[in-house]
Amino acid sequence: MSILQILEFPDPRLRKIAEPVSVFDEKLEVLIEDMLETMYEAEGIGLAATQVDVHKRLLIIDVSENRDSPQVFINPEIKILEDELSEYDEGCLSVPGFYETVSRPRMVKITAQDAKGEKFEQTAEDILATCIQHEIDHLDGKLFVDYLSILKRQRIRSKLQKELNKSA
Ligand code: GNR
Ligand code: NI
């Protein structure tokens, strides 16, 4: 297993639109294992393939307290089940150190495939619903900072750009 490098905003590769997964092979299983290891090491509750520069429609989530209940969603689609929104202070491993409140639909239905290509359906509420929407946004080249004011986004961008320049 290996820890993968997580891209950081404003890296343009975070804006790529991921392609559907069509082959469910050993290589995919290895990618999933590496993404899980990377997510746990970074102490995130989710990770989208886009964040590790793999532009495939694949995301993983673990919102459990004990960090022992990973969920894998491949080619996920969501349907909003309620008009009600919920607000969370969102963070992102690709936007390190920044947390801002974002509103999203509170309850969604997800259809996706598992690592074997088997289709499944699941409803999600609250933090799980938020996290899945946040991860699907990554697959579509979107980041939570896109929901903030331009001013806030520019401030975050210039602070992170300075950090990236320092380490370059
Ligand atoms: O670790 C994460 N925490 C989080 C908190 C609130 C809403 C969304 C998230 S996802 C984030 C990990 C990440 O960046 N996934 O893409
Ligand atoms: Ni994120």
Image (tube, rainbow, N blue to C red):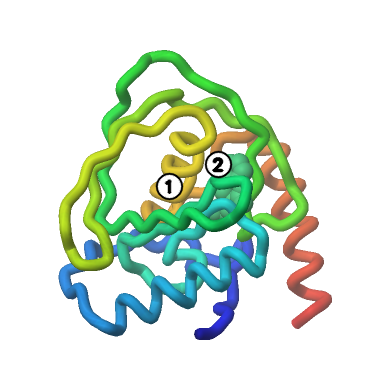
Question: How far across and down, in percent of the image, does residue 157 sit?
Answer: 70, 54
Give the amino acid type for the residue marked by disc 1 in the picture. Asp
Question: How far across and down, in percent of the image, does residue 43 sit?
Answer: 66, 59
Is disc 1 placed on a helix, strand or loop? helix
Q: Nearer the viewer, mark 1 or mark 2?
A: 1
Marks 1 and 2 close (CB-CB < 8 Å)? yes
Q: In the picture, residue 103 is in which quadrant?
A: top right
Q: Residue at x 36, y 58 (%)?
A: 72
Q: Is the residue marked 1 within 8 Å of ligand 2, measured from its CB? A: yes
Residue beneath label 1, please? 137
Residue 40 visible in image: yes
Q: How far apart are marks 1 and 2 (CA)?
A: 10 Å
Relative placement, left or right, of 162 versus 90 is right
Quadrant, the C terminus: bottom right
Q: Which mark is residue 146?
A: 2
Q: Which residue is drawn at 50% across and 68% down?
A: 36
Give the amino acid type for the residue marked by disc 2 in the picture. Asp
